[in-house]
Amino acid sequence: MINRFKETICSNLLKLRRAHNYSQQYVGRVLSISQPAYKKMENGVTNINACQLGALAGFYGVPVQRFYSDTMMLDDDADEMKERWVQLKEQLHNTNMLLEVYRKRIAELEAKVARKDAKIEDLRSKTGDYNHRLSKL
């Protein structure tokens, strides 16, 4: 369980740093530690303490809880998701339009089949009448 939290925190440290285009050296300075020390922290070699996590939360403008989230959503992720949402809504709309076209076509074809069935019944009836008349001759 502890390893899972540690992996999640390390992953989120990396995500946030990359999302802001910061170097390890720059973030290390925020914590008053060297780049190699920050790298070890980000890679999970050394543990981050609560004060450091609080300092990074303030630096990035996120609540500390975000570091513990398996599904940390960054602004870039949110923008991508919004764009994907718009695309999916458009696809759904187009699919519904196409579905309506198909439903209308099916109704037209069913009506045509019903007319053909009626015509076949009419012809069978006439054929039956002719056969009955011929048998009387």
Image (tube, helix red, strand yellow):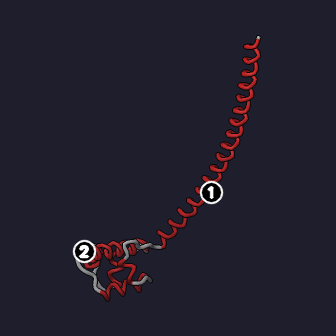
Residue at image mark 2: 3
Residue sticking out furthest to the top:
137
Compared with residue 133, is residue 1 higher up or lower down, i.e. above or below? below
Q: Tell me which residue sits at (58%, 55%) in the image.
A: 91
Kind of residue indicated by mark 2? Asn
Q: Tell me which residue sits at (47%, 69%) in the image.
A: 77
Q: Which mark is residue 22?
A: none
Q: From the image, which quarter does the N terminus lie in?
A: bottom left
How many numbered dots are placed on residues in this image?
2
Q: Nearer the viewer, mark 2 or mark 1?
A: 1
Name the one closer to the observer, 113 or 28: 113
Residue at image mark 1: 93
Name the one closer to the observer, 10 or 112: 112
Name the one closer to the observer, 93 or 33: 93
Name the one closer to the observer, 119 or 66: 119
| First-in-chain label (2 vs 1) | 2
Residue sticking out furthest to the bottom:
51
Distance between the Cα atoms at labels 2 and 1?
45 Å
Q: Quadrant of residue 36?
A: bottom left
Q: From the image, which quarter does the C terminus lie in?
A: top right
In the displayed structure, does residue 136 sit left or right of residue 19?
A: right
Q: Secondary structure at mark 1?
A: helix
Task: Tell me where residue 62 appears, x and y as whole percent.
Answer: 43, 82
Kind of residue indicated by mark 1? His
Q: Tell me which residue sits at (62%, 50%) in the image.
A: 99
Q: Residues within 10 Å of mark 1 (few under 14, many from 20)?
A: few
Compared with residue 74, is residue 32 higher up or lower down, i.e. above or below? below
Compared with residue 73, is residue 132 higher up or lower down, i.e. above or below? above
